Image: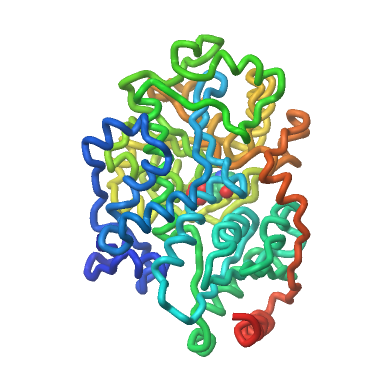
Amino acid sequence: MRYFSTRNRGEGVDFAAAALRGLAADGGLFIPEEIPRYPKAVLSSLGDMDFCDVALETIRPYVAGEIPGPALEDMVRSAYPFAAPLIAAGDRMALELFHGPTAAFKDFGARFMARAFSYLRRGEDKPLRILVATSGDTGGAVADGFFGVEGIFVTVLYPRGRVSPLQERQIAGLGGNISALAVEGSFDDCQRLVKAALGDAGLRRRMALSSANSINISRLIPQAVYYAAAAGRAFAGARDPDGEATPRSAAAFRDAGALRGGPADGAADGAAFGPVRGEPAVFCVPSGNFGNLTAGLYAMKMGAPIRQFIAATNINKTVPDYLAGGVYEARLSQATISNAMDVGAPSNFERMAAHFSLEEMRRIILGVYVSDEETRRAIARVHDRWGYFLDPHSAVGWEGADRLFREGRLPAGPLGILCTAHPAKFAETVEPLTGPVPLPPVLAKALERIPAAALIPPEVPAFTGWLENQSTAAP
Ligand SMILES: *Cc1c(COP(=O)(O)O)cnc(C)c1O
């Protein structure tokens, strides 16, 4: 497959170059020259396939000729020992994307990217050093995804004192090939330091540097997998049982027994929007940078049975406003309780616009936005009524769908809310509204780690100096 810049269809590169470079030379994002379709045999069995098989079928055409089948199969099986269950939650379905090691959906992209980088650089003797600036979630997922991957060292920069204790342990508690730098400054300072180092020609002559941000095509493609797997399940009239990390209150868990399994037993109160055999699903996607939603669009174009998407944002509503008014206007971001979605200029919009016209987007995507107050009320209401815990991001999705329902704009058919993080990750916001949130085993384990980070001032020489020391020491 060839990949082109969103800004210039002239000259394509292969998957390896698109993944390892991250951003095209002209500042555009890499997109595949075409979005392949699933073979008919795959489409007709999507609902019965195991998650890793869906992953293989989804990713294969994008890396054809560069990653052979057996290598891809190894990568996928080691990346995804967990899946993305589509479970019954109240009157609808939750597509739970938080069963991975950092309890947020970014695990799906980061874990594949790590394995792809390692494979694509096989035979290189110079180790690769990946620089990541994080405000919290991304750093943890990237660190965990690359942990133990040979020939790759990761440096995560985070603003000291501005990430949660859990996030700090996820970033700085691994050790090994992952180092953490606590920067005495803001997230913007961290980003500035990373950009300066990546742009430092002298430094780049002495060490191989790369980044791992969310616009990387190797993070995007694997995110199409859970859409296809879930849409296939719903189209077959089925859904999955609760998983180990499914956050229900104990009392509700008993009742949920009746809702598990197939559509026939989903009578209790809900299943109003449960799976129906032969009906394509509607997915509601809590969105910030729009990588997740863009991956959904890819899954739909590949032929997965999806009717429409709902793009739910917090008050950073650049894309809902674009869909409503037809004018794209990037803004400064505003802080909210769903802070992983505080993005005023979503970078993946450029990809969406490269693939779809405004008219097409309006046909496929319904935009909606939700305030912090409404988000909090949704967390409390869903817990009181259904015994299901939502994190603030997933709650934006849940409430966004409710809003469309009240306005008579919700499409008919099975409805899946993408639940992007485990509520225990945001306990400080969720627990005052619901009481204690059950802690999943992966987060309990992470809390036991002891964070070890080097402290640096927010100054470029301090950071580049630290990097030089690293490269002459260990790797
Ligand atoms: C990153 C993130 C989002 C936003 O996803 P995008 O792909 O940037 O739209 C939503 N929820 C959580 C928990 C996240 O970490």
Residue drawn at (61%, 37%) of the image: 371
Please name whichever residue, 212 or 115, is drawn nearer the observer in this view of the structure.
Answer: 115
Q: Quadrant of residue 393?
A: top right
Q: Is residue 24 above or below residue 48?
A: below
Residue drawn at (62%, 87%) of the image: 472
Does 22 sit left or right of 438 as displayed?
left
x and y percentages locating residue 445 in the rendered image? 72, 48
Q: Is residue 263 above or below residue 121?
A: above
How are the residues colored?
rainbow
Please name whichever residue, 85 or 187, is drawn nearer the observer in this view of the structure.
Answer: 85
Q: Quadrant of residue 189?
A: bottom right
Residue drawn at (42%, 72%) of the image: 121
Figure quadrant of the C terminus: bottom right
x and y percentages locating residue 146 in the rendered image? 55, 62
Please name whichever residue, 406 or 381, is drawn nearer the observer in this view of the structure.
Answer: 381
Q: Is residue 257 above or below residue 452?
A: above
Q: Quadrant of residue 64?
A: bottom left
x and y percentages locating residue 33 in the rendered image? 24, 58
Please name whichever residue, 86 or 66, is drawn nearer the observer in this view of the structure.
Answer: 66
x and y percentages locating residue 125 in the rendered image? 46, 81
